[in-house]
Image: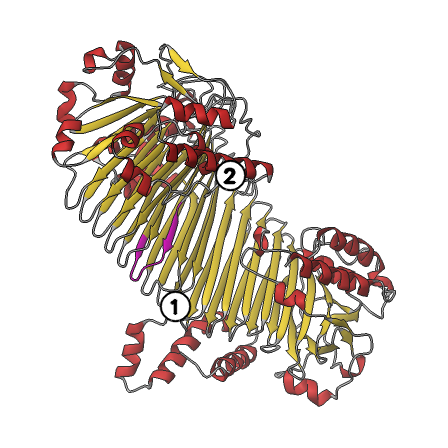
């Protein structure tokens, strides 16, 4: 068994390649000047620049006051915000007419990642807004989506073409003053995705963005905004891989979702960024603020995430259940191996009547991995009949890892019902033995048991993603079972 | 708020210099005063105090009483019923009253204020540097009890801490040594003589030696105007067993900290708790079990009933250290909210650093089950009575685990009485 383990544990990060593309960079460091340059490069309107500057001021203030969050169960060296590039984009050579004009190396990269950019992959039914480092270079299926009135594209385009929508919703769910990393993102965000689903439209395909961190020492500061008008539906996929690097890279994204009356947003993530090597060298620092607002009655927001990458994960996708009868869901599989650390969970803020939330979190910890579930369920005084069910299970593989649970339940309404359960255990010897005596190899048995452990979450993923997620678990997990 | 805390800190520190403490407390006072000067009183910015605002407590000018009341024995008996035929010791406003003691059992009870204690007896387990109120207690404590449990003691030790004077603060200190192979029961009973507003800040240190078994009952029933902060620090050696029963019935401000280190293989700890929040009261229970070595078991059940606009806080922390394999830990915190104004903040917390463990926790918050109510009502039971029955049933799981059946019955009666007194059994 130990041989298998070592073999698997030693498996190199599969997606570690670097694409050589000429890049355009602005100088290292963070200052008001840099914020202005980013804004100018993107040809942004005055109001957005002002907003960025306010955020920057706030960020500086928080930095001075020492507000860099330290409550999470994570340990990492202090981040030097001056020793980083805040903007990097592939140099615009000329206006692109079709996919053929896209840098072939870029296309090859996407191909390696399996992104269906090309026409023949249209059958996959996925429209991709690929973010390569910081600027969207190609968008497919736009026409088809436009026919339905769906707007889907890069954030910068949205600022140009639909400033009224961006202005109305930007920062309405995650204000720039929300937290340290949200303030940083608001000041220097480079690009991201924007989706708008008009009233009554059911988005015919799954919208998808592939984020990829490419340039060395470049923090990515993505900003995503999704608005679902009344009675609309959208499923959005976000998947990530990053090439192998030794320098720690910072990623501080902000995602804002807005669901109006009867609307539903399903947001799925597979995150497989470079986790660092066996000794914890390198890897992505991932500090993300994701939040959805169920503004309308009977609206629904569902977060599903599979987090297997990054050296540090700091992520709490939440739902603000404002509308009566609105529903929030959070399904998560998080995996930490080697020296990875994850502090992740969710926030469910119940404000409206009869709001419901479900939290299913599965944590798997292996090697020296440290993993924490941190969640908040808050029932406000007016949330009559609110209902929450939370389940947080941890699976421990190996005797050097840790799994921790920090749920906060704050209830101010007596007519609500909450249940929270958590368990921590290791893979049962008897389960393994049972599989082995039926001729299933140890590796397969562990994979089966782990996939079974995560089933409740994986089945929430769209088909294409579920496959990738299972494969990812296979690669990252089995390797360290002891 | 910061100013209020600082002036409260200054007032307490001034009290610490008023009189020289008895010999047993000299060393403790020196260290604790330094810690309290350093750290002061906690604010809500500290994670341990996130849901608990002590502004009200700090705003009152608590007096240190040096010449306590001398109430007749009957006054104590009235409030401290049921008093068993057991080793009774009474402390009034923090001072021992030797004339009120009962017949001794097999356990030895010494008072710390009058008998010379061995050096470094106090402060071995309760860390003044980590807990502001432990520091405050250490700085101001001048009396208390040391209980040594030998052999198999069928008679419970009953320590009554009665509060008599308005706006008085007391800082009692208790040290319990359950000696090797011993068995015993100790009841710490916090009561009020006159329903006066007062502040009790107690620290209990419990050591369970190998193979020893102890039931520690902490009753807090001093009434709706009482401020109570209690800290219990325990350590259980190999195959030792500690069962705690923390029953808090009402109070304006109640904060219980319970920390147990399972330090020897095979050690066991059961922590039961019941808290009843009434009126505008706040009841906060913090527990911490530290599985420091392999093969230990901890079980925890804390149940809360909250009425009026009472607030409940629960935080249960279970830590399983690296190498503490084969640990088993369960934790459960169900809460019943009986009125619209009631609130609960609960945080069951697991920190696991070993892999071969079985740990689980659960928390639930809800009201009385409408179906159960309907069932009872359909059988001709009035709504009020049905609610009372269900609430009592909810509490019974904790109360029935009390070491003496008669104590369980008596506490059940007190529980109902307190609940009914609010006029809303709802």
- Residue B280 image position (x, y, % from top left): 52, 73
The residue at the point 42 percent across, 69 percent down is B336
Q: How is the image coloured?
A: secondary structure
Looking at the image, which is closer to me, A352 or A38?
Answer: A38
Q: Is residue A352 magenta?
A: yes
Return the residue at label 2: A58
- Residue A57 image position (x, y, % from top left): 51, 36
Question: Is disc 1 surrounded by few (<14), some (14 to 19) or many (20+) residues within 10 Å?
Answer: many
The answer to which image quadrant residue A99 occupies is top left
Q: Is residue B75 magenta?
A: no
Q: Is residue A344 left or right of residue A262?
A: right
Bounds of the magenta span?
A: A346-357
Return the residue at label 1: A414
Query: Which comes before the other along the chain, label 2 or label 1?
Result: 2
Residue A284 visible, this orientation = no
Q: Is residue B418 left or right of residue B196?
A: left
Does residue B206 sit above or below A363 in this rendering? below
The residue at the point 15 percent across, 32 percent down is A146
Q: Chain of mark 2?
A: A
Q: Chain of mark 1?
A: A
Q: Secondary structure at mark 2?
A: helix
Does residue A307 sit above or below B312 in this rendering? above
- Discs 2/1, front: 2
Q: Same subunit under labels 2 and 1?
A: yes
- Residue B245 image position (x, y, % from top left): 57, 67
Image quadrant holding the C terminus of chain B, namely bottom left
Residue B299 visible, this orientation = yes
In three-dimensional space, the C-alpha distance between marks 2 and 1, rounded to whole angstroms, equals: 38 Å
């Amino acid at each position: 068994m130990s041989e298998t383990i070592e073999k698997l544990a030693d498996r190199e990060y599969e997606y570690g390649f670097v694409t050589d593309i000429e890049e355009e960079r602005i100088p290292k460091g963070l200052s008001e000047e840099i914020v202005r340059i980013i804004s100018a490069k993107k040809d942004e309107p005055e109001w957005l620049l002002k907003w960025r500057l306010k955020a920057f001021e706030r960020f500086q203030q928080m930095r001075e006051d020492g507000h860099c969050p330290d409550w999470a169960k994570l340990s990492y060296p202090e981040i030097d915000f001056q020793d980083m590039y805040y903007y990097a984009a592939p140099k615009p050579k000329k206006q692109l007419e079709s996919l053929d004009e896209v840098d072939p190396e870029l296309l090859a990269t996407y191909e390696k990642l399996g992104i269906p950019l090309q026409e023949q992959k249209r059958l996959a039914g996925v429209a991709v807004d690929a973010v390569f480092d910081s600027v969207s270079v190609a968008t497919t299926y736009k026409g088809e989506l436009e026919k339905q009135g769906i707007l889907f594209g890069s954030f910068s385009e949205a600022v140009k073409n639909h400033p009224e929508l961006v202005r109305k919703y930007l920062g309405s769910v995650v204000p720039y003053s929300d937290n340290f990393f949200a303030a940083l993102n608001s000041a220097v965000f480079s690009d991201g995705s924007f989706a708008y689903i008009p009233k009554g439209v059911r988005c015919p395909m799954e919208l998808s963005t592939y984020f990829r961190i490419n340039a060395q020492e470049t923090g990515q500061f993505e900003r995503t905004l999704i608005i679902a008008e009344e009675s609309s539906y959208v499923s959005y996929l976000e998947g990530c891989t990053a090439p192998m690097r030794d320098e720690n890279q910072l990623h501080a994204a902000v995602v804002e979702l807005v669901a109006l009356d009867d609307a539903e947003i399903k947001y799925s993530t597979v995150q497989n960024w470079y986790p660092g090597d066996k000794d914890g060298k390198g890897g992505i620092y991932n500090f993300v603020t994701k939040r959805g607002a169920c503004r309308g009655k009977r609206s629904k927001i569902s977060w599903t995430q599979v987090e297997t990458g990054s050296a540090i994960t700091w992520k709490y996708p939440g739902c603000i259940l404002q509308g009566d009868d609105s529903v929030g869901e959070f399904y998560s599989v998080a995996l930490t191996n080697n020296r990875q650390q994850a502090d992740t969970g969710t926030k469910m803020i119940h404000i409206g009547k009869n709001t419901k939330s479900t939290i299913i979190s599965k944590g798997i910890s292996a090697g020296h991995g440290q993993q924490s579930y941190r969640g908040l369920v808050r029932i406000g005084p007016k949330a009559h009949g609110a209902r929450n069910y939370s389940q947080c299970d941890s699976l421990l593989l190996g005797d050097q890892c840790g799994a921790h649970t920090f749920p906060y339940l704050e209830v101010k309404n007596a007519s609500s019902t909450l249940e929270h359960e958590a368990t921590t255990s290791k893979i049962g010897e008897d389960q393994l033995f049972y599989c082995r005596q039926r001729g299933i190899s140890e590796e397969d048995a562990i994979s089966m048991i782990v996939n079974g452990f995560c089933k409740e979450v994986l089945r929430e993923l769209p088909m294409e993603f579920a496959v990738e997620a299972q494969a990812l678990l296979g690669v990252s997990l089995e390797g360290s079972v002891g | 708020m910061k100013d209020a805390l600082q002036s409260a800190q200054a007032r307490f520190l001034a009290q610490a210099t008023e009189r020289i403490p008895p010999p047993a407390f000299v060393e403790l006072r020196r260290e604790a005063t330094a810690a309290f000067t350093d750290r002061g009183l906690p604010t809500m910015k500290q994670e341990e105090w996130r849901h608990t605002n002590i502004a009200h407590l700090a705003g009152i000018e608590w007096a240190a009483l040096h010449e306590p009341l001398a109430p007749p024995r009957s006054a104590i008996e009235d409030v401290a019923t049921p008093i068993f035929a057991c080793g009774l010791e009474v402390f009034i406003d923090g001072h021992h009253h030797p004339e009120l003691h009962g017949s001794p059992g097999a356990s030895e009870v010494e008072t710390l204020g009058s008998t010379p204690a061995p050096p470094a007896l106090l402060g071995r387990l309760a860390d003044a540097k980590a807990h502001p109120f432990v520091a405050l207690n250490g700085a101001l404590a001048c009396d208390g009890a040391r209980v040594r449990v030998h052999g198999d003691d069928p008679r419970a030790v009953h320590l009554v801490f009665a509060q008599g004077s308005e706006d008085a603060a007391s800082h009692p200190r208790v040290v319990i040594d359950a000696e090797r192979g011993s068995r015993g029961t100790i009841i710490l009973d916090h009561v009020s003589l006159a329903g006066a507003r007062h502040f009790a800040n107690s620290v209990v240190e419990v050591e369970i030696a190998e193979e020893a078994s102890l039931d520690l009952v902490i009753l807090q029933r001093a009434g709706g105007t009482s401020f109570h902060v209690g800290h219990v620090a325990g350590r259980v050696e190999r195959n030792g067993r500690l069962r705690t029963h923390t029953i808090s019935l009402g109070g304006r401000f109640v904060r219980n900290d319970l920390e147990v280190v399972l330090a020897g293989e095979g050690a066991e700890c059961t922590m039961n708790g019941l808290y009843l929040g009434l009126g505008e009261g706040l009841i906060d229970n913090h527990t911490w079990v530290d599985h420091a070595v392999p093969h230990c078991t901890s079980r925890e059940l804390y149940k809360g009933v909250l009425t009026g606009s009472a607030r409940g806080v629960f935080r249960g922390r279970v830590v399983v250290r690296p190498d503490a394999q084969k640990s088993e830990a369960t934790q459960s915190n169900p809460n019943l909210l009986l009125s619209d104004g009631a609130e609960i903040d609960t945080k069951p917390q697991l920190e696991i650093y070993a892999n071969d463990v079985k740990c689980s926790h659960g928390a639930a918050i809800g009201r009385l089950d409408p179906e159960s109510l309907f069932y009872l009502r359909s059988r001709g039971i009035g709504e009020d009575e049905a609610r009372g029955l269900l609430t009592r049933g909810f509490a019974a799981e904790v109360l029935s685990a009390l070491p003496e059946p008669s104590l369980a019955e008596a506490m059940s009666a007190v529980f109902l009485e307190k609940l009914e007194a609010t006029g809303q059994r709802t």
